[in-house]
Amino acid sequence: MNKKSLSESKLRFLFVSTDKFVPFRVDVAVLFGQELVRRGHVIDWILQSEKACHKQYETIWSGCRVWVGATDTGTSRFCRIKKHIHDISNDFRMFCLASKNRYHFIQVKDKFLSALMAILAARLNRTRFIYWLSYPFPEASLYRVREGIARYPWFYWFRGIIFKFLLYRVIMPRADHVFVQSEQMKKDVAAMGISKKKLTAVPMGVCLEGIPYEPNKGPFMQNKTERMVVYLGTLARVRRIDFLIRVFVKVLRKVPNAKLYLVGGSPDPNDEKMLKDEALNQGVEGTIIFTEFLPMKEAWRFVRRADVCVSPIHPNPILNPGSPTKLIEYMAMGKAVVANDHPEQRLVISESGGGICVPYEEAAFANAIAQLLTDDLMAAEMGRKGRLYIEQKRTYKTIADLVEAKYDLVK
């Protein structure tokens, strides 16, 4: 079959990702499934099914062709092995697709063995190879071993060592370009010997069309009988949200009518129980509301009513390179934020003026929350600045401009 001709101004590429079909993460579903497709770029996808599926199939999603791989949703070790085999088998399609279609490049996100296949497929077909890293997977495996929280320590150690070697000695050196999650991750990857010239940080953003925002209804217009502090996100133990409960004990000393809403949950019910036990031990169980997991639009209803939103991120080498979505969503809804000095949060708060950034210390965090709860005008002004910053720098339209420009250079 003859290779298809390409428009000089539009891109055509193959995207192989760990995201399951149908993709729901905004950095994939919105950035690629909406923004880049709207601009006329053609994306072919290789993804594994999220739901139980016993046979590979081809379909259309967001105007793009998708080759969906079979999967096994069982929880036994044998079923998990089958799931990985199905995934790798589906990714082998890239060789056939790359030979039939004249792609500008093949892009792989967060996969390691499949990245090796993509390097070979790109070389065989004289096209480019791009790698996208959203999380420090090798370091995370090794970190869990060091912290004693790995379920299978030897397996996690072996996987971390192998993936670290593949990522920094094989995959990234052979990539024509590498996208990473944040400026901090860019520094970390460069420290592993990868040239900064081939690295681009692409932080998380929002699609403003779906974000509720009422610019004329600041905190100062809300009911004063309850001052509402909202945390939106996972309650998994690794996030150490017990820190926030102890912070809130100190907030209540200055703002007795405050309440803390923990909007989210954890896959492990023991994690939430631990937090409830901590609230009981601290004597603040009546002022902390657990909502459990909610659909995003329902969760945003709590953020809309909030006087202050909080984003505590425990300092560790695995979370430091991240780009927290919750911070951007808070600001997009015009909410003043209290965050600790995590690299990405420190950058966003300093550039925007949309909140207060403090050390990861209980007293400092509590003082900042109390300050905003007792100064509505300050909170309203920070909320306004935060929204303006998101409109200018963190919409997926703006992020798509950045990614598109880098693609043009690579091709």
Image: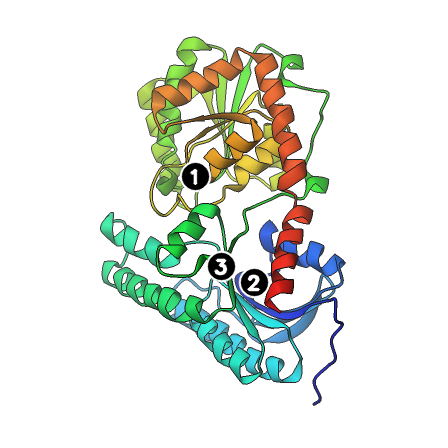
Q: Which residue is mark 1?
A: 343
Number of other residues with Cα within 10 Å of mark 1, as a class: few under 14, some 14 to 19, many 20 or more = some
Rendered view: 238 above or below 312: below
- Label 3 neighbour load within 10 Å: few <14, some 14-19, many 20+: few
The amino acid beneath tag 1 is Pro
Residue closer to the observer: 353 or 277: 353
* SS state under label 3: helix
Residue at disc 1, secondary structure: helix
Q: Alpha carbon of mark 2 to alpha carbon of mark 3: how far?
A: 39 Å
Q: Quadrant of the N terminus?
A: bottom right
Amino acid type at mark 2:
Lys
Decide which of 213, 190 is in the foreground and name it.
Answer: 190
Numbered disc 2: secondary structure: loop
Q: Residue at x 31, y 22 (%)?
A: 281
Q: Are marks 1 and 2 in contact (CB under 8 Å)?
A: no
Residue 298 in view here: yes
Name the front one of labels 2 and 3. Answer: 3
Residue 284 visible to an observer of this rendering: no
User: What is the quadrant of the C terminus in the image?
Assistant: bottom right
Q: Position of residue 204 (x, y in %)?
A: 56, 46
Q: Amino acid at mark 3?
A: Lys
Instruction: Give the x, y percent position of residue 142.
Output: 28, 56
Find the distance from the CA under tag 1 to the CA under tag 2: 36 Å
Q: Decide: is 54 above or below 338.
A: below
Q: Position of residue 369 (x, y in %)?
A: 47, 19
| Location of residue 68 in the rendering, given as x and y in whole percent from the top left corner | 60, 70
Q: Which disc number belongs to residue 51?
A: 2
Residue corresponding to mark 3: 197
Residue at the spot x=34%, y=25% of the render? 361
